[in-house]
Image (cartoon, rainbow, N blue to C red):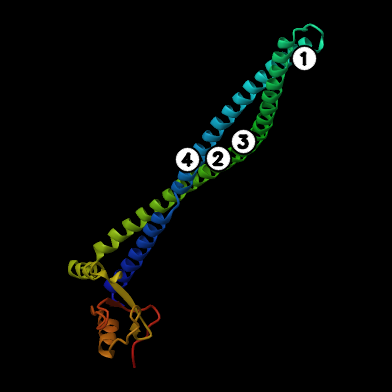
């Protein structure tokens, strides 16, 4: 078997491995999608924090107002029912003020109940989103670590394959190497293929007997009449009878 054809096929195998390594490198997940999701989750979390802080401030202010209303209500009730006011006009004024205070107190208590429920809901949502952010950050850290390790491993393999490719290419006649490169560059993907049971290993069309004999016996450079790839003898091929 011709050493040139053996090395040509090894070159093709190496190029296929290089392409596969490059494909795997390009397909690696560097965490960009998760990172984008984390940014969105973080923005939502910060929004929830702001909403929660606002609700708590309103709740605190409302509780202070309620305390002031109750103090004023108690004072008015004392004036009305403690015998401190006998003037009918003043009694009517205090009655009106008491009614107004009661109405304000009822509205404020309703709002405070709403705020307490809102604070509880916001705290739950914030805790859930914070947990999601923390888990996402941990997952992203693992992904980035795995990405770095796998990238380094694949790049090392690529470097080794490329060095071996340069060595093999150096053993080939310049004209043969140029033909191989032109075929690959022509959109065929592979510049060379093995003969499998008397047929082209890529397009599976039969190789003429004379071409098979020239390849096996003389190491001739032949191309497939159908797909144009350079033909290399398969390791298990036996000469035609």
**Above or below, 222 relative to 60:** below
- What is the distance, in whole Å, between disc 3 and disc 4 at their CAs? 20 Å
Q: Secondary structure beneath disc 4?
A: helix
Q: Are marks 2 and 3 in contact (CB under 8 Å)?
A: no
Q: What is the number of the mark on residue 39?
A: 4
- Sequence-wise, the earlier of marks 2 and 4 is 4
Please name whichever residue, 106 or 118, is drawn nearer the observer in this view of the structure.
Answer: 106
**Residue 188 image-quadrant placement:** bottom left
Q: Secondary structure beneath disc 2?
A: helix
Q: What is the number of the mark on residue 77?
A: 1
Q: Are marks 2 and 1 in contact (CB under 8 Å)?
A: no
Q: Residue at x 38, y 78 (%)?
A: 235
Q: Residue at x 70, y 27 (%)?
A: 106
Q: Position of residue 148 (x, y in %)?
A: 45, 46
**Above or below, 175 relative to 25:** below
Per the image, the residue denoted by label 2 is 133
**Above or below, 113 relative to 148:** above
Disc 2 crowd rating (10 Å Cα; few below 14, some 14-19, many 20+) is some
Q: Is residue 69 left or right of residue 204?
A: right
- What is the distance, in whole Å, between disc 3 and disc 1 at their CAs? 38 Å
Q: Is residue 177 left or right of residue 27?
A: left
- In this rendering, which labeled residue sits more in front, label 3 or label 4? 3
- Sequence-wise, the earlier of marks 3 and 4 is 4
Q: Secondary structure beneath disc 3?
A: helix
């Amino acid at each position: 078997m011709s050493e040139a054809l053996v090395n040509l096929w090894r070159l093709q195998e190496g190029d296929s491995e290089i392409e596969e390594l490059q494909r795997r490198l390009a397909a690696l997940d560097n965490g960009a999608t998760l990172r984008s999701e984390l940014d969105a989750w973080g923005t939502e979390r910060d929004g929830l924090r702001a909403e929660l802080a606002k609700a708590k401030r309103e709740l605190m202010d409302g509780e202070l107002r309620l305390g002031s209303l109750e103090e004023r209500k108690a004072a008015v009730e004392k004036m009305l029912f403690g015998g401190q006011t006998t003037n009918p006009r003043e009694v009517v004024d205090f009655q009106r003020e008491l009614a107004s205070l009661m109405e304000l107190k009822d509205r404020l208590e309703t709002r405070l109940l709403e705020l307490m429920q809102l604070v509880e809901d916001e705290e739950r949502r914030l805790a859930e989103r914070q947990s999601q952010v923390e888990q996402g950050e941990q997952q992203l850290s693992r992904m980035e670590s795995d990405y770095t390790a796998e990238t380094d491993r694949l790049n090392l393999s690529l470097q080794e394959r490329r060095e071996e490719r340069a060595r093999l290419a150096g053993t080939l006649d310049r004209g043969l190497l140029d033909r191989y490169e032109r075929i690959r560059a022509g959109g065929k993907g592979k510049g060379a293929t093995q003969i499998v049971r008397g047929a082209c290993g890529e397009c599976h069309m039969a190789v003429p007997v004379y071409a098979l004999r020239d390849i096996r016996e003389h190491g001739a450079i032949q191309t497939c009449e159908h797909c144009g790839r350079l033909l290399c003898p398969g390791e298990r091929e036996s000469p035609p009878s």
